[in-house]
Structures are given as structure tokens and as C-alpha cells.
Image: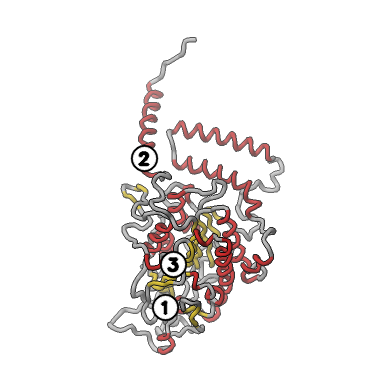
Amino acid sequence: MKQNLSINRREFLWKTGGGFGALALQGLLADTTPSHARFPHHKPRAKRVVQLFMNGGTSPMDTFDYKPTLKAQHGERFDPGEGQLVESVTNSPGFKVMASPFEFQRRGQCGQWVSEVFPHIGSMVDELAFLMSMHSPSNVHGIASYMQNTGFTLPGFPCVGAWVSYALGKINRNLPEFVVMPDPRGLPYNNLANFSSGFLPAKHQGTVIQPSSQTPIPFLHPPEMASGITAEGESDGLNLLQKLNAAHLQSLGGDQLLESRMQSYEDAARLQLLAPELFDLTKETSAVKTLYGLDAEETKDFGTRCLMARRMLERDVRFIQIWSGAGGPSNNWDNHSNIHKELPWIARQVDLPVAGFLKDLKATGLLEDTLVIWTTEFGRMPFTQGESGRDHNGGTFVTWLAGGGVQAGTSMGQSDRWAWKAETPIWCYDLHATVLHLLGIDHTKLTFRHNGLDRRLTDVHGEILKPILG
């Protein structure tokens, strides 16, 4: 049979234009999509990352940065000398120096000073590497949180978890590569933007999970009222949807947003099969549950999320972020009113679970190639706010790391005698460069072309923190 090869002018222009567009897109994707041939750049020390983020600004001089000067000058007006300007974010009249109300003692063979608010984490200091002079350019929660998570103070940039996902991809194709477990009391400052993929493909954004909820992953299964939806019908519908999406994608010559959406559907379908077993803690022993604090109301929630993180690590989830503290004036580490009561209250919620998590990872061998990071967005002031609170301070704060190529029992950096400013500032760029280095990535080579610029997680900064590396 003779074929009809006629084609009208409009269809000819559309098809030829689409063909050239596809060629251009193919070249673009070659420049912006990582290949396993390019990553990693060197042999990695870590395979997975867990970030424990204390939302609200944890006070360094009341946790890990012992400052006897505060006790000696307690009640005096704070004066750093040399005419240095002392400012307060939310008004601290009088600027009176306040000694820490908590006792400190040296812990472990490394002799790290630790406050009494962290008795259990204090027992693990020989496994940790402390960064004693982290610094933030801002003492505003949202801006500082963006800085620590994305390396920028403005919204719209990918977070570190998204960059790791983009560079290295999945280890287990049935689970998300980047999982976020927020505090069930509420999302942190900036809400979901802290877990954003920014200008990277949408598939690299964090998958939000609430293990303590009756529905840890929303909309993963049909609602109970939808009795007409059967497993067979749902499977047929997904197959049809996949075919329609594939045909549409081919007609467009490629589309990153559509590809990401298709990938998310496929990921969700695979997750449906694995989720019931993943979230089932009934097979965990009572000893393990006690280790994580699941048998006490105060530690149950954070302990559950830490235990769930260990189960995800066993199943090779690449990057996990666990948040302590909601956004807002309470239920977090933002201790403006009364640090005597507010700090111990929230510290008790994480202290035992975090120590148990580290012990479990070490016992199971997971700590060897899993990097654990404990951090916050900024510190607190060395003088009082009101009667016994502390205001925001970007000048210095503490972060610690464990596992995955880190030299245990070490520390680097130093703050001044009040824990007001860092004498040797360590920036988020340095922390991010070090995290990527331990994952086998050269932070200067991990780029994505966006608006005419080769964007990096570390922007134009970043030094690897070699003194804490094993």
C-alpha cells in the first residue's frame, strides 16, 4: 500500500523545530545531569549521611563551649573592649553577663567539656569531632537556617541533601535518596524550603516522613473511604499513566519537570511495597527500643525517628535529616525566656536517643561509612535577655560530626572567652566542603548550570576541615 507522505507547513515546522529542540536539550542534560562516570571524584570515606538539626539556635556556652569567664563576670555589663559594637536582635536591656546555670565537666579520654544537660551525648565524646567556632553571617532564624542548609541566605537554592542526591543518586532504587523527618510539633523556620531541591531537578528534594504519625507518608495509599479502588485497578491505572506520560515526554523532546514527576510516581509505587516493613518496629528488641528511649514519653518521638533512621541506613537511604524543634517562639532551642528551664527540657528529648543512635550505629558497623552531623543555625548571647534568657548570636556556635572518615575524639576552632565571637571562624561552606569530600566529591567540581552561572553548594568558598579527618 502506498503511504501518504504529505505533511502540512505547520506540522513540518513543529516537527523540525522539536527535533532541534531535542538535540539542544540533549546537550543541556549532558551538562547538568550527573553521570556515575563523573562522581565520585575520589574514594569516599562515607556512603550515607544523617544530619541532626537542632532548630532555634542551641546555646554553645550552656552545652559544649565551657566559659569560666562568664562566671567570673556574672552580672557585670558585657564589654568586649576596643570599642566593639554590641547589638541584640530582639532587645536585651542592660547586656548583663550571665554565667551558665549548668555544671560542666570534662568527658572521655579526649577531655571535651560537656554540660550536664547532655549526660548521654557526653558519654560519646570520644566518638565525636567538634567544630567549636562555627559562624553565621545572620542571627535571624530563617536566613541563618537557609545558610546552614543551602549555603545561601536567600531562598531558591538547593539544600545539601539535594546536592548529595543529585551527585550520587540512589543506592536503593526502592527508597528515596533524601528523607526528612521534621519535628511533629511543626515544620522548622522556612518550612519545606529547608529541604528544597531549588534549581536542581525536583526529584532531588527531600521526601518528608513522620514515623510517629498513623500515616508516616501522606497519600501513599488510597483513603479507606475509596473502597472502589482495588490493587489490580490501581496497577492498571499506574501502567496507563506511565504510558501516557512516556508518550507525552517523547512528544515534547524531553522535559525535566515531567521526568521528575514521572520518577516521583515510580518511587512512590516502589515505596508502597517497602513502606510497611520499613515502618514496622515490632521486630526490634526491647533492648534496642530502650536504647533509643522509646519506653519514655519524653524521648519516644525523637528516639523513634532516630531508630527509623537506622533502619533506613540499613536499607541504604543516602541522606537523612532529623529535626528537633518547630519554628516559632516555643517548642524548640530558641531559649529567649528562661534557659534554666527551656534548655534542659528540649535537651532531654534528644540526649538519650542521639547517644543510643551512635551506639547502635557503632555496634552494627554502620558508623564506619555513615557520617553523622549534629548542628544548629546559630548560637546565643553571653548576656541575659530578660531575667534568664539568651538572645540570638551568629558569632559562634558548636557543631559535631561522627563516623564516616571523621577522626574521633578531636576538635578544631575556638571562640573568644565569652563564646560571643569565633576567633577562628568555620563557615557552613567549610562544613559542606568536608561533607562532600568524605562522600568522594570535590566541592569545586560539583556544579549545576543555572541562569548563566555554574552554581555550587559552596558558592566560591569552602575549605576542607582536614584537622578532624581520620
* Residue at image mark 2: 28
Indicate the amino acid at tag 2.
Leu
| SS type, badge 3 | loop
Q: Is label 2 or label 1 in front?
A: 2
The residue nearer to you, when weighing 114 against 180, is 114
Label annotation for residue 367: none
Q: In the orientation shown, which residue stands out farthest toward the right?
A: 227
Q: Residues within 10 Å of mark 1 (few under 14, many from 20)?
A: many
Q: What kind of residue is marked 3?
A: Gln
Image location (x, y in percent) of residue 279: 64, 55
Q: Residues within 10 Å of mark 2 (few under 14, many from 20)?
A: few
Disc with the residue nearer the chain's start (3 vs 2): 2
Query: Number of numbered discs present?
Result: 3
Task: Evaluate whether residue 221 shows in this view.
Answer: yes
Dot 3, crowdedness within 10 Å: few (<14), some or many (≥20)? many
Is 85 placed above or below 309 here? Answer: below
Determine which residue is flagged by label 1: 381
Q: Is residue 158 visible?
A: no
- The answer for how far apart the CA atoms under marks 2 and 1 are is 48 Å
Residue 358, quarter of picture:
bottom right
Marks 3 and 2 sit apart, C-alpha to C-alpha, by 40 Å
**Picture coordinates of residue 327 (x, y %)?**
51, 66
Q: Secondary structure at mark 2?
A: helix
> Measured from the top left, where is residue 354 in percent x and y?
55, 68
Instruction: Tell me the residue that label 3 is attached to.
Output: 407
